[in-house]
Image (cartoon, grey):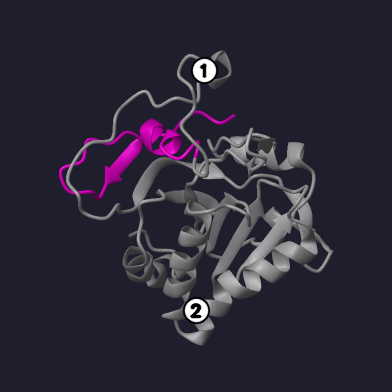
Amino acid sequence: MHPVPKLRRARRAGAALTLTAALAAGVAACGGPADPADPAAEGERPVAEVSGGSEPARATVLDTPFPKPDLVLTDTTGETYEFVEETRGKPTLIYFGYTNCPDVCPTTVSNIAYAESTLSEAEQEELQVVFVTTDPERDTPESLGEWLRGAAPGATGLTGDFATIQAGARTLGISIEPSVKKENGEIESMHGSQVLYFSPEDDKAHVLYTEDTNADTYAEDLPKLVKGELP
């Protein structure tokens, strides 16, 4: 895993925010919080609290950017998709989630999709939005494709081997765990809810968004991100 980069700035009014807290804030995005007494959660818990006002979360710009994960997965057409090659030199957003998520995933994806719809046709063509499932057993290429056609038609959906997906997420400081069945029969996928932006200038992740980022913030930032500028 790459060292946790330092935070350059957090555009959140009155907030005292560290990147470690930002990365850990969404570990249990579609489930409950990790049990602090659980030894397996060691290293995944926030080491600092996020505090501040009630204004929408803004972009976190990283001092030490993350390189792209070496992910080779399957897209919704059933074809092999090499993340590094397919997105080389292109402004790219990546998000890990799953189609049966009851709350955070559809909200995040729809926020990005709305913001993308405000771009020009050329900008939409340039921007790459990649959704990687954290629940590959249920999210087949077909079912993932159907879900994205309704939620974010312009996004690329990826599925494949869970171990590969988990390893790729971890290189970005994002924690995901295998799906588990709860006592009520509901299947739950625990995953980080961060969205990372890779610049076309150097193919590294320079910006992080949390699950609290709203559609207006994405709409404000995307025109800059497409050009390789930081928000």
Q: Nearer the viewer, residue 64 or 132?
A: 132
Q: Residue at x 32, y 64 (%)?
A: 217
> In the shown orientation, is residue 137 left or right of residue 6?
right
- In the image, is residue 113 above or below residue 169? below
Residue 57: x %, y % from top left: 30, 52
The three-letter amino acid code for the residue at tag 2 is Glu
Residue 48: x %, y % from top left: 32, 26
- In the image, is residue 27 above or below residue 86? above
Most common SS among magenta residues? loop
Query: Is 9 colored magenta in this rendering?
Result: yes
Q: Which residues are magenta?
A: 1-28
Decide which of tag 2 and tag 1 comes sooner along the chain.
1
Q: Is residue 81 visible?
A: no
> In the shown orientation, is residue 161 left or right of residue 230?
right
Return the mark for residue 102: none
Residue 150: x %, y % from top left: 60, 74
Identity of the residue furthest to the bottom in this view: 121
Q: Nearer the viewer, residue 148 or 93?
A: 148
Which of the 4 image quadrants contains residue 130?
A: bottom right
Label 1: which residue?
42
